[in-house]
């Protein structure tokens, strides 16, 4: 049984026609999601290094606002528009977590539970107002606003959690392995019937952030920090190119829309 049937009693066909502001959750969705998390991590660090923290945050905030304005303005799911917004959420979500730690000196042991509580508050308010957290029901502006608020909170939480495990002794590669194993838990729990589709989706969605970010950091950072020393610029460009290829394919094939099913 799919999430929309769990949380809404209207026919599946009707919901699919109306829920057209987000893509279908396919293997491509998860691949691009992980790529955006890694690219957002290294792009944020690169911008802060080149421009300085304050200009980088300002530029990231403006780009995020612009991308979300376009996303809200379109009347249906458009692959380029949607994934551009996700990329900018990734970049700015990283900056939000880094501002707390680097700028304000808040340790990851505090920022991680803080962002967890923030995400829980978004989910609680979303469910109290809409009685659903299903991404297959994003068919009003209000639900779309809740959706993107949750997405932003998951990126900030994932950034803090990934940095917490990396600096706690696991390192970036060890953190990537940890989260690669962790992301299998909600998938297996859902397949076994122990976890509903909606909580399984959002749990996996949160874990993709530290998974992708840890991989990208491991590739970009120097040997002294346990990385491959490929550099922030090359890793950012490489992951961006991969995102462009996948999103271009989906835009052409429409394999992530209900009309293709």
Image (tube, rainbow, N blue to C red):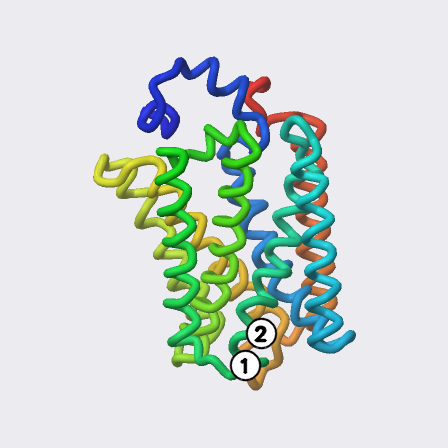
218 sits to left or right of 80: left
- Image x and y of residue 237, in percent: 73, 59
How busy is the neighbourhood of tag 2: few (under 14 within 10 Å), some, or many (20 plus)?
Answer: some
- Image x and y of residue 52, in percent: 74, 77
Q: Quadrant of residue 1?
A: top left
In the depicted view, which residue is nearer to us: 135 or 37?
135
How busy is the neighbourhood of tag 1: few (under 14 within 10 Å), some, or many (20 plus)?
Answer: few
Residue hosting label 1: 104
Please name the residue shown 46% across and 28% down the image.
137
Question: With respect to residue 14, does 70 lie above or below?
Answer: below
Please name the residue shown 64% across and 39% down the image.
82
Which dot marks residue 216? none
Question: With respect to residue 241, does 99 lie above or below?
Answer: below
Please name the residue shown 54% across and 63% down the image.
213
Cβ–Cβ under 8 Å for marks 1 and 2: yes
Q: Quadrant of residue 130?
A: top left
Q: Earlier in the sequence, mark 1 or mark 2?
A: 2
- Dot 1: element: loop
In the depicted view, which residue is nearer to us: 17 or 238?
17
Q: CA distance from mark 1 to mark 2?
A: 6 Å
Residue hosting label 2: 99
């Amino acid at each position: 049984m799919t999430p929309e049937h769990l949380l809404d009693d209207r026919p599946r066909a009707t919901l699919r026609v109306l829920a057209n502001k987000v893509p279908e959750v396919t293997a491509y969705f998860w691949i691009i999601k992980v790529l955006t998390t890694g690219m957002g991590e290294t792009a944020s660090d690169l911008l802060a290094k080149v421009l300085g923290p304050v200009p980088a945050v300002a530029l990231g905030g403006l780009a995020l606002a612009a991308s979300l304005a376009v996303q809200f303005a379109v009347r249906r799911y458009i692959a380029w528009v949607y994934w551009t917004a996700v990329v900018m959420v990734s970049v700015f979500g990283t900056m939000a977590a880094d501002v707390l730690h680097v700028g304000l000196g808040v340790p990851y042991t505090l920022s991680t539970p803080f962002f967890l509580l923030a995400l829980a508050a978004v989910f609680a308010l979303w469910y109290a107002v809409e009685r659903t957290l299903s991404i297959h029901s994003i068919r009003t502006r209000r639900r779309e606003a809740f959706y993107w608020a949750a997405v932003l909170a998951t990126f900030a939480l994932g950034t803090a959690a990934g940095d917490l495990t990396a600096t706690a002794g696991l390192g970036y590669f060890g953190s990537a392995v940890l989260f690669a194993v962790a992301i299998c838990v909600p998938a297996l729990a859902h397949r076994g019937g122990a976890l509903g589709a909606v909580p399984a989706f959002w749990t996996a969605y949160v874990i993709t952030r530290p998974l992708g970010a840890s991989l990208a950091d491991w590739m970009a950072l120097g040997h002294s920090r346990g990385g491959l020393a490929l550099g922030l610029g090359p890793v950012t460009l490489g992951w961006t190119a991969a995102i462009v290829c996948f999103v271009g394919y989906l835009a052409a094939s429409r394999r992530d829309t209900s009309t293709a099913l």
